[in-house]
Amino acid sequence: MDLNCDLGETVDGQPTADDAAMFSYISSANVACGFHAGDADSMAASCDMAVQHGVAIGAHVSYLDPAHFGRADVDIDRAALVGHIVEQIGTLAEIAAAAGTTVRYVKPHGALYNRIAWDAERADAVAEAVASCGLLPIMGLPESRIAEAASGHGLTFIREAFVDRGYTAQGALVPRGEPGALLPADAVAERAVAMSVERIVVAETGERIRLDVDSLCVHGDTPGAVRMAAEVRAALEASAITIAAVTS
C-alpha cells in the first residue's frame, strides 16, 4: 500500500507541517507547486528530502488561490486551468531534476480535487493538462469523474482514500468545517488497516462502504499528523502490508 502526504505547503515561507519528520513514514509526497502554498525553496527542500528517504514525488496542483489555501472553488475557464496545471507540473519537474529525481504523478489539491470528483468538464481539463506533461498518473477519489477522465486520456489512475477524513454514505468526503470532517488521531490506524485489508470505510452514518484503493493519505497539516503517520505505518506493517510507492 502506498502512504502519501501533502507536503511543502509553506505559507509566506513558513511550514504548515513537520515535513522532515513526515518523510520518514511515507512512500509518496504530494509537493505543493506554489499556487496554493509553497515556493521554489520549499519545492527544492521537499525534493531533496524525497531523494534522501526514497520517496516518490507527486505534483500537488491547485487553483491559483493562496488566499484560501486552495480550498475555495474558483471560476476559471478551461484554457487557463490547463495552463495553470501545466505550469505547476513544469516548475516542480525542473526543481526535481535539479535534485536528481522526477515527478512521478499528479494529485490535485483542495477545492480542485473536490470539484473534479463530480464535474466531468473540469475533470477532463485536468486530465488533458496532465496528459500533455508526459502521461503522468493522476491520484484522486475512486469511481469519480477524474477517474473517468484519466482513462479517457490514457492515464493511469491512482485510487486514493483519506485515513484522517470523514466519508459520507455516498463515498464522498465530509466537507471541511462540518462535524465529522476530521477524525481524531486515535481512530486512524485501525481505519487504515480496514481500508487496506477489508477494503471498506465506515461512513459518518455508520454504514460500511466498499472502497478499493491504491494509496492512503495523511494530511500533513492535520493536528498530530506525524504521530498519526507513524501509527498508520506501524499498524499496516503489523498486518503484513508493505509500504511502497504505487508509481514506478
Image (cartoon, helix red, strand yellow):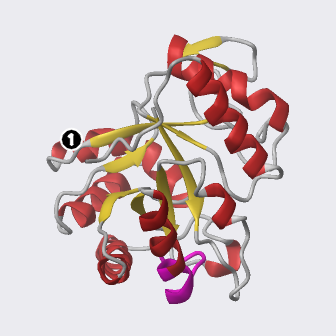
Question: Which residue does the numbered mark 1 point to in the structure image?
Answer: 151
Horizontally, is 229 left or right of 94 in the view?
right
User: Percent x, y for residue 83?
Assistant: 31, 79
* Screen quadrant of the N terminus: top left
- Element at badge 1? helix
Q: In this view, does 183 lie above or below 197?
A: below
**Left or right, 180 with reference to 147:** right
**In percent of the image, x 72 and y 65: which residue is there?**
17
Vertical position of residue 211 compared to residue 147: above or below? above
The quadrant where residue 205 appears? top right
Find out whether residue 42 is within the magenta segment: yes
Can I make out residue 84 in this image? yes
Q: Nearer the viewer, residue 101 or 170?
A: 101
Give the crowd class for mark 1: few <14, some 14-19, many >=20 residues within 10 Å. some
Residue displayed at 72% across by 35% down: 231
Q: Which of 209 and 169 is in front in this view?
A: 209
Question: Horizontal and vertical percent for residue 37?
Answer: 60, 77
Q: Which of 32 and 52 is in front in this view?
A: 52
Note whether residue 170 is visible.
no
Region rendered in magenta: 33-44
